[in-house]
Image (cartoon, rainbow, N blue to C red):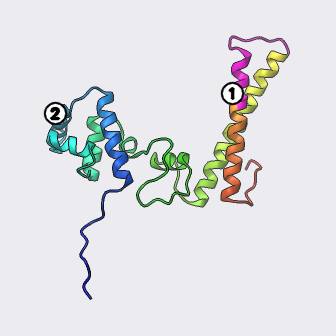
Amino acid sequence: METERVRGNSAGITHEHVAANLRAARQAIGMDVRTAARRMTDAGRKIAPSGISKIENGDRRVDVDDLTALAYVLNTTPAALLTPPAEAVTLSGVPETFLPEEVQVWIAGGVKLTTDDLVRYWKEQRFQAISSAHWAEEMLAKYDRGQVGVTPREVYQERYDAQSAREADATGRLLQLDPNASLAFE
């Protein structure tokens, strides 16, 4: 029985995100591919202008050293180049069971994709939402007592509503991850 030899894995969805983010970052600062290539050479990671174009078109892979140098040259972060669009949850090797927010926070280094750490994260998010909603509620009460401020009452109402919705979302995800989670503040 003959086994087919496979050299490396094919490029995945993360590769596509990096390519799109790289092009967007370069264009956002008005830099052309020649300038990016020159700055990469200056940074010690020589890449021809055609190499930059190939990376942006998904025809060339980026190793981690190139990724960090590209992030530096383009005045961004490696995390920003790796981060999928806000609505995407798919990354190479990462199960699709995670919410887009969880993936975004994971890429930024704010959470590990473990149940324990996600429970911690959602508890913190829930606490922040409750605190913010409470503050907005206090401001609404001041308006109701006739203590009108500079900011219109509607702004505080919108903040209260948004934070109440955020609390509900955080509570829902927390209970999905751990149905026995304590909702009391610890």
SS for tag 2?
helix
Callout 2 amino acid: Arg
Q: Residues within 10 Å of mark 1 (few under 14, many from 20)?
A: some
Residue at position x 77%, y 11% from top? Answer: 148
Which mark lies nearer to you, 1 or 2? 2
Q: In which quarter of the view is residue 149 placed? A: top right
Residue at numbered disc 1: 159
Q: Position of residue 138 (x, y in %)?
A: 78, 25
Give how far across and how far down residue 13 sits, in percent: 38, 53
Residue in view at x 21 percent, y 41 percent: 52
Q: What type is the residue that disc 1 sits on?
A: Arg
Contact (CB < 8 A) between labels 1 and 2? no
Kindly identify which residue carries mark 2: 34
Residues drawn in magenta:
145-161
Q: Is residue 174 above or below residue 10?
A: above
* Sequence order check, earlier mark of 1 and 2: 2
Q: Is residue 156 magenta?
A: yes
Q: Nearer the viewer, residue 1 or 40?
A: 1
Res 27 → quadrant? top left
Residue drawn at x 53%, y 51% is 111
Give the percent coordinates (x, y) of residue 109: 47, 48
SS of the residue at dot 1? helix
Residue 179 in the image: x percent, y percent?
73, 60
